[in-house]
Image (cartoon, rainbow, N blue to C red):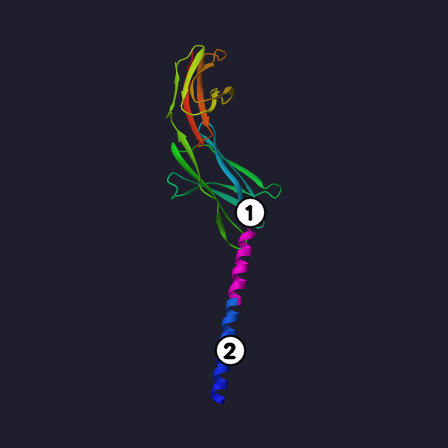
Amino acid sequence: MKKLFWTTLAIGLICHASIAQQANKTAINEQQAKSISDSVLFQHFTCTAKSFNKVLLQWGTGSSSGVDYFVLEHATDSNHFETLGILKRTASSNQFEFMDGNPSPGLNYYRLKSTDSSGLVLYSDIFPVNIEGNPNFKFYPNPVDKFLIIDSQQPGDLQIISNTGNLLLTRQLQAGVQVVNVSMLERGEYVLRMVYKEGNRLVLDHLLKN
């Protein structure tokens, strides 16, 4: 009987220790989950080709308690990221933006990095932006006199910009061949830009006006 008693007691102690250990692990997991949920959460992170050789990065945050700055990272292969810039968080706003003034030709990849007060490193989703030459897009004549013929396989926004960066003309174009009147432009050199929302692509070229 004594042997049975001590055996039963030992089993009971082992079970109690196992339950306590499991409860402790559950408490730790809940604490870790809480620290993650209370950390900065990147919201509506977008990267958009905005102008000649520039990409605008915009994002918002949820709870940003304990986060002092954001690190913006860039890569051309979606794996080997390098620091593009550092933006200090302001307490007065949860909306932020940063301009990449020198993206690489072809695909560019962007992501955000931040560290909360507990030391947890957080990353946003990776966002691609394609800076292309002029695939599936043609325009002529160049130099042009009065009418510019645009041949594009996708709908997009046509913009003509001066060398000083002023937007002089904009047109929403459908897919196919269309004619744009550019007679109001003075003689000189311009930047012709096509912005394709589908695929987040930007096409840039030079336009001469007679």
Going 52% across and 74% down the picture, which residue do you hit?
16
Q: Is residue 80 magenta?
A: no
The label number, if any, that marks residue 13 in the structure image: 2
- Image-based side of 185 in relation to 64, left or right: left
The nearer-to-camera label among 2 and 1 is 2
Of helix, strand and loop, which one carries label 2?
helix
The label number, if any, that marks residue 95 in the structure image: none
The residue sitting at the right extreme is 92
Task: State which region is magenta.
Answer: 23-39
The foreground one among 8 and 56 is: 8
Q: Amino acid at mark 1?
A: Asp
Going 41% across and 31% down the picture, which residue do you hit?
131
Image height of 16 relative to 29, above or below: below
Of helix, strand and loop, which one carries label 1?
loop
Image height of 105 relative to 140, above or below: below
Compare marks 2 and 1 and give the one earlier in the sequence: 2
State the image quarter where residue 105 is shown.
Answer: top left
